[in-house]
Amino acid sequence: MGYDFRKIESKWQKFWKEKKTFKAENKSDKPKFYVLDMFPYPSGAGLHVGHPLGYIASDIYARYKRHEGFNVLHPMGYDAYGLPAEQYAIQTGTHPEETTNKNIKRYREQLDKIGFSYDWDREV
């Protein structure tokens, strides 16, 4: 019997999403802690290896601070209003709003599959 990682990952990702495990509460007696990653440019068909490489370290730190008893706010967002988004739209011959929304959706799917502990209620 092999390790069915797809089954186990989907089980826990579903649990985290339903229970809002990583949501930072506004009213909490716990000390506050804030972890912010650099936002990706949604200017391509998906994440590249450099995105998770940087996000893994901050995610580990956010989880560690939660373990220490902190109320950790760890949001994610997208730098969607710059030249990279415009250039991608020009390359694909598509309106920037359309490519940006499509790419944000794809990035979110990929970030969720990796299993990062973002507070998606605070998406920027």
Image (spheres, rainbow, N blue to C red):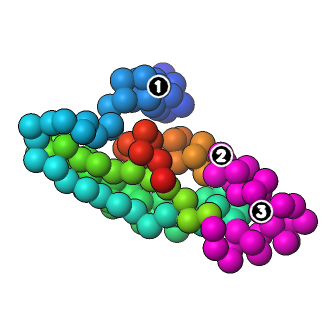
Name which residue lies at 48% across and 59% down.
52
The image position of residue 2, as x and y in percent, is 49, 28
Of 41 and 121, which appears nearest the observer? 121
Name the amino acid type tagged 1: Lys
Name which residue lies at 33% across and 51% down.
74
The residues colored magenta run: 81-106
| Left or right, residue 19 beside residue 124 | left
Give the residue at mark 3: 96
Give the residue at mark 2: 105
Element at badge 2?
A: helix
Between label 3 and label 2, give the one nearer the viewer.
3
Q: Is residue 19 visible?
A: yes
Name the amino acid type tagged 3: Pro
Between label 1 and label 3, give the one nearer the viewer.
3
Question: Which numbered disc, 1 or 3, marks the residue that appears first in the sequence?
Answer: 1
Name which residue lies at 9% across and 37% down.
29
Element at badge 3?
A: helix
Q: Is residue 15 above or below residue 79?
A: above
Instruction: Please say if the residues under marks 1 and 3 sit with CB atoms less than 8 Å apart.
Output: no
Which disc, if any, is residue 14? 1
